[in-house]
Image (cartoon, rainbow, N blue to C red):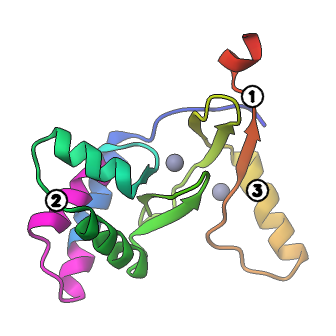
Amino acid sequence: LSGIIRRVARSKQSRWLEHARGELEHAGHRSGGARSAVLEALDREPCCLTAQEIFDNLRTDGRAVGIASVYRTLELLWNLNLVRRVDIGASACYEPEQPGGEHHHHLVCERCGKVSAFEDARLEDAIQRLGRRLEYKVGEHEVVLRGACPDCRAA
Ligand SMILES: [Zn+2]
Ligand SMILES: [Zn+2]
């Protein structure tokens, strides 16, 4: 691993928002109210969020969206392939599924619980190569590395 950890570029995020709104409309769903609040909360964040975190963020912003609506919206977005579900800890987290397939993977510190994102081109090549060897066309995939983050290692 080359250890490239960076935040997803803003431009990609905004493209997702447009894309997600278009797909919702196409599937016959209005994107007002709770739905649009959840879309914007996901769009603002470079990495994944749990339903509870989305609920809390919206409440901090003064947007009253019930937790049940957050769950319903996430389920809908997931069914439409607009978010990916990442299983990192006790609860599932969600992040935008970019229309161009750009994605990152995750590092989880088992001591402090911090989640970080990384991208690595050689890892992606290796996954595609593995797919060819197994005669699979690899699409979505998850890589989660667990261990101790730099801060916890130093402590
Ligand atoms: Zn992420
Ligand atoms: Zn990947």
- Left/right placement of residue 141 relative to residue 53 reads right
The residue beneath circle 3 is 125
Q: With respect to residue 48, does 24 lie above or below?
A: below
Q: Distance between the residues labelled 2 and 1?
A: 35 Å
Where is residue 52 drawn, in percent x and y?
Answer: 36, 53
The nearer-to-camera label among 1 and 3 is 1
Q: Which amino acid does label 2 sit on?
A: Val
Residue under the point 44% across and 63% down: 97
**Label 3 near label 1: C-beta < 8 Å?**
no
**Label 1 near label 2: C-beta < 8 Å?**
no
Picture disc at residue 65: 2
Residue in the foreground of this view, choosing between 23 and 39: 39
Where is residue 140 drawn, in percent x and y?
Answer: 61, 69
The residue beneath circle 1 is 148
Q: What stretch is highlighted in magenta?
A: 22-43
**Label 2 near label 3: C-beta < 8 Å?**
no
Q: How many labels does the image show?
A: 3
Q: Is mark 3 on a helix, strand or loop?
A: helix
Q: How far apart are marks 3 and 2 (CA)?
A: 41 Å
* Magenta region includes residue 23: yes
Q: Quadrant of residue 150?
A: top right
